[in-house]
Amino acid sequence: MSGFFENYGFLIVTIVQQALLGLSIYFPLMAGQLSLASIGFYSLGGYVAAVMGTHPALAPLREALGFWMFPLEWLGALVLSVILGIAVGYPALRLRGIYLALATVAFVQVVNVAVLNMPIAGGAVGIFGIPQAFESRLDYIWFFGPLFLLALFLVWRIGNMGRGLAFFAVREDELAAGAMGVAVTGNKVTAFVLGCALAGVTGAMSAPFLNTWNARQGTFDASVTCLAYVLIGGSRSIWGPLCGAALLVSLPELLRPLKDSRMILNGIVLVAACVYLPQGIMGGLAALRARLSGRGGAA
Amino acid sequence: MSALLQATDLRRRFGGLMAVCDVSIEVRPGEIMGLIGPNGAGKTTFFNLLTGMTRADSGTVVFDGHDVTRAKPEAIARLGLARTFQNIRLFGGLTLMDNVRVAGRVQARHGLLSGLCFTPGSRREDEAVTEKAFDLLRLVGLEDRADHLAASLPYGDRRRLEIARALALSPRLLLLDEPAAGLNPSEKLGLADFIRAIKERFDLTVLLIEHNVPMVMGLCDRVMVLNFGQMIAVGAPEDVQRDPGVIEAYLGGDAHGAA
Amino acid sequence: MDFAWLLQSLLNGLSIGSVYAVFALGYTLVFSILGIINFAHGAVFTLGAYLTYALAVGRFGINGLLADVTMPVTLPFVPALLVGAVLSGLAGMAVERLAFKPLRQRGADPLLALVSSLGVALIVVNLIQYLVGAEIYSFPADIFGDLPMAVIFQIGGKPVAVRTIQIILFGASLVMLAGLGWFIGRTRGGKALRATAENADTASLLGISVNRFILGTFFISGLLGGLAGTLIGVSFGVAGPYFGVSYGLKGLAVIVLGGLGSIPGAVLGGLVIGLGEAFLPSDMSSYKEAVAFVLLFAILLVRPQGLLGGRLEQKV
């Protein structure tokens, strides 16, 4: 068993970390908002942690706090993400559908260029030598695991209590939701900011995990990969992001023997999953269960 | 007795089309008022102006003492003005129960945080909302399908669910946009009684758009008539029925409503 | 802010902006018919540049599977550009068949088309990398034969350089835009395309084979994308298989700025972004890549339907 974790520990932690990013897209989707901004907040959160972890001016603070520096970094990323999320969300969420998605893509691009031009972020090289929280990469599960459970709890609880109904009402029909007294913009912004905050804190935890941080953490491809976790895992199930991340993160590892051509296969899997599993893995499983229990294939 | 809803000189233009032109009307507490007019007369636009879904170019709307001319739809809804839609807009992916609970949650005092922490207050509130929603579903005869998805309902049942959802807001004024459209004759017959019943039970004021003239005449205390965006008559049903301008509008334009 | 600088910036902006317009039209055509954004368009752009390079230069570097292979025949630049564009058009058709048609037939969530088209992009880009490596390919300086690199004018004692490549970019783009305008406005195929764009159901009632026209649209879209890729590649070099990604995103900014689905809007949007980049003061040049996205964000906030888009009225 220990051999298994030594070999696959990094992979497992990465799956949870990526599933967190998937969940950060799931939050706004609960209110029907397709946002690709998560990766921008992830990138910024990582920079916050990287700067707080390495900047010489903060050395005394790090000495004084020791391990507690890490939670402080998360807090810093959280505060920044919430403030920026509200500032971006209020104007952007007046937009619908693909317009919102494109506005968030633009936001990520602007963040990238801005970060590249900030001396404190280390330009194209980025920030390296970020202090580690644990000796083994596997131990980072103590960062990502609880955050993941917390995020899952949030998603589950919001979906099962009255307040979550407002999100769903906005998703189903904004106009009717407004007519029923649901604060449309307020709920959209809340769902969006929850996603931003989760992505930001995930970034702050990831900077020590990955040891270096640079603008390549926030690419457009990465945003879409996060969306793919949700869609391929199943966008109507809280387990969808985890399933999607598990598949898409482990696939390149499984395909490692194929070396250079494995990314091509990764693309083929994306296309095939969209075509053959339009409800995602969880949706496919539900359909299978329905069929096996003899209630016909109506899923 | 002061008006519950007072619209003054409401005007809205879409491009070259004057959809609603300087319409003034007051709806008195406790009455059932009908809004009729040929197709394209601006009836639905008028509803949208009252509920904040379309901005007025000019004019004012005062509901229950609040100027709501520039208010958001949700703010107006919370003041107690509920509506249904001509083409029925349910939350198709939610259960019947949840459709009704959405509106019930609006008056809730306990927010996201207390809900996340399972505070007793928020739990009690959720239970109260659920109970009320169940009562409303029973009122419209859909309680046995409470956990079905709204999208799975047949047409006639959707209308009833939409009314139950509107009632969950505990409104003072209920706007119904063609509630009889698409119903079969026996359902239509029952609808007038149903509207009277909920009006008494919930102490409502009702403003409804309807094409079915006999139903409007039998149900409403007063009727207003729109034609090409202008109000051409308002008054008791029998007076409006004899109004030469109204006869002209119906015979000259769309006659099917007079049937 | 002297006159020579203004003139030079105007020239730079118009030439690059016109290429943005050609590229963005590929998005617009598909969006106007399917209401979906084809995220593989940037990959087709990249492919076009590589195909033209292969046809015109015929060497494949040292890293990929095709290292040391040389093409037996090479074409002069203009035929290579045209053949490369047609092949890109075929690639566009393949994208439709792989990423869009199967989902359409299953009535899948339109969001999935976004992911599946990105999947195809991933396949194309990595296939390129697999075959010819990640190195930078530059077209040789004499690709246009004896034409001079640039003509330099003196304006008020300051030089203004008109690079040959800029004239070619601008000229080729104008020809493409005029051709497209003629096709859509004047030909039967163009009218059918417009009918399909307005309403697929009506179009099929009129006896138009919708699937064939969608395929045709993807061909034109790919053609425009491949052409733009070559033009950008020949002026700035082909900087690896991922060089289309940033242009792909910029193209999105162009169509949103102009108004989604609007053909004149895409042209205007391309020119505005090209000029916006060119007129950026030189001490802010490191922010050049953000210009398109700042403009995109700004327009969405002020006028979400874009410069030339129709009003977005919400149906009640």
Image (cartoon, grey):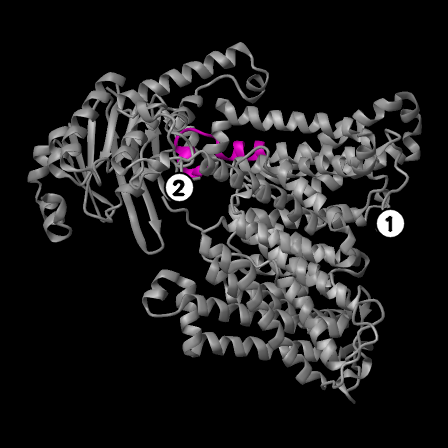
Residue B146's quadrant in the figure?
top left
Q: Residues within 10 Å of mark 2 (few under 14, many from 20)?
A: some
Residue B199 image point, x, y percent: 23, 21
Q: Could you tell me which residue is drawn at 82 percent across and 57 percent down?
A: C283
Residue C90's quadrant in the figure?
bottom right
Magenta span dominant secondary structure: helix
- Comparing C48 with A76, the one in front is C48
Is C59 on the left-hand or right-hand side of A135? left
Amino acid type at circle 2 is Arg
Q: Chain of mark 2?
A: B
| Region in magenta | A172-191
Disc 2 is placed on an element classified as loop
Disc 1 is placed on an element classified as loop
- For residue B55, the mark is 2
- For residue A200, the mark is none
Residue B121 image point, x, y percent: 51, 11
- Comparing B60 with A281, the one in front is A281
According to the picture, the residue beneath numbered tag 1 turns out to be: A125
